[in-house]
Amino acid sequence: MAGSISELPAVPIEGHQPMAVGSADHPMRQMTRRAAGLVPDAPWDDAARAEVAAYFDDLAPTWHTRTSPGREAVVADVLERGVPTDLAAADVCVELGSGIGAYTPLLAQRWRRVLAVELAFEMLQRAPAEPGHRVLADGALLPVADGSVDAVVLVNCFLFPLEVDRVLPPDGLLVWVNSSGTHTPIHLSSTDVVTALPGRWEGVASEAGEATWCVVRRSAA
């Protein structure tokens, strides 16, 4: 493993249940591993980008049914226990796969500016204009300068390791959340996350209700 992860105690979240049934053969699980560079000879490309955008465009009209207080509590737990206090009020956060904007308000409480990035146009259309700045873009080609953001947050979104490495400064944070744990179609373990990222990374991981999450940054060692 290219780094080290410390496990924090799991916390219960009343009423939180998995809202997806993901498995190794789920098309979005396969696409997750492709995006992270964990599938040899199957890179993220234009065809993959179009397939994912179409998939989530189709789901957009009913996506609001997948939000819940329990899922919001999961993200709140990550921000409370996972984000170091010295970076909790930092400047710029990129929220990848922001969807209909369910979690952007929570992020806007912790970072001064949130760039909410979404690939599926139909999802973005259903998101409120505020808080955050909403951008239609591919997470593999972010419209931000090198080392210019303090955190990249991915709640059930694809990890693009090289792009994350590019946009984060040396002390920048990657926040990874799977709201339905291993049942999440877009799932990577914390080990997968740090293995996919260039260099050495360290941080913490935990479970909240049925969810799993980790928060990592580059190792100083």
Image: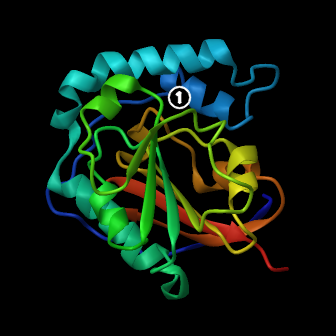
Say whether residue 175 is visible: yes
Instruction: Estimate the x, y position of residue 213 in percent, counting from the top left.
Output: 47, 59
Q: Left or right: 140 with respect to 55? A: right
Residue 109 in the image: state x and y as whole percent.
Answer: 32, 72
Query: Which residue is depicted at the point 39% across and 38% down?
Result: 183
Q: Is residue 23 left or right of residue 189?
A: left
Please indicate whether residue 173 sits to the left or right of residue 133 in the image.
right
Q: Residue at x 74, y 66 (%)?
A: 201
> Please, what is the three-letter code of the amino acid marked with disc 1?
Arg
Query: Would you say 147 lies left or right of 173 here?
Result: right
Quarter of the image where the C terminus is located: bottom right
Query: Which residue does the numbered mark 1 point to in the structure image?
Result: 29
Q: Quadrant of residue 104?
A: bottom left
**Disc 1 element:** helix
Reply above or below: 199 against 57. below
Indicate whether 190 appears above or below 55.
Answer: below
Name the residue: 25% across, 58% down: 72
Question: From where the camera sits, is residue 209 visible?
Answer: no
Q: Quadrant of the N terminus?
A: bottom right
State the image coordinates of residue 114 (x, y, percent, origin top left).
43, 59
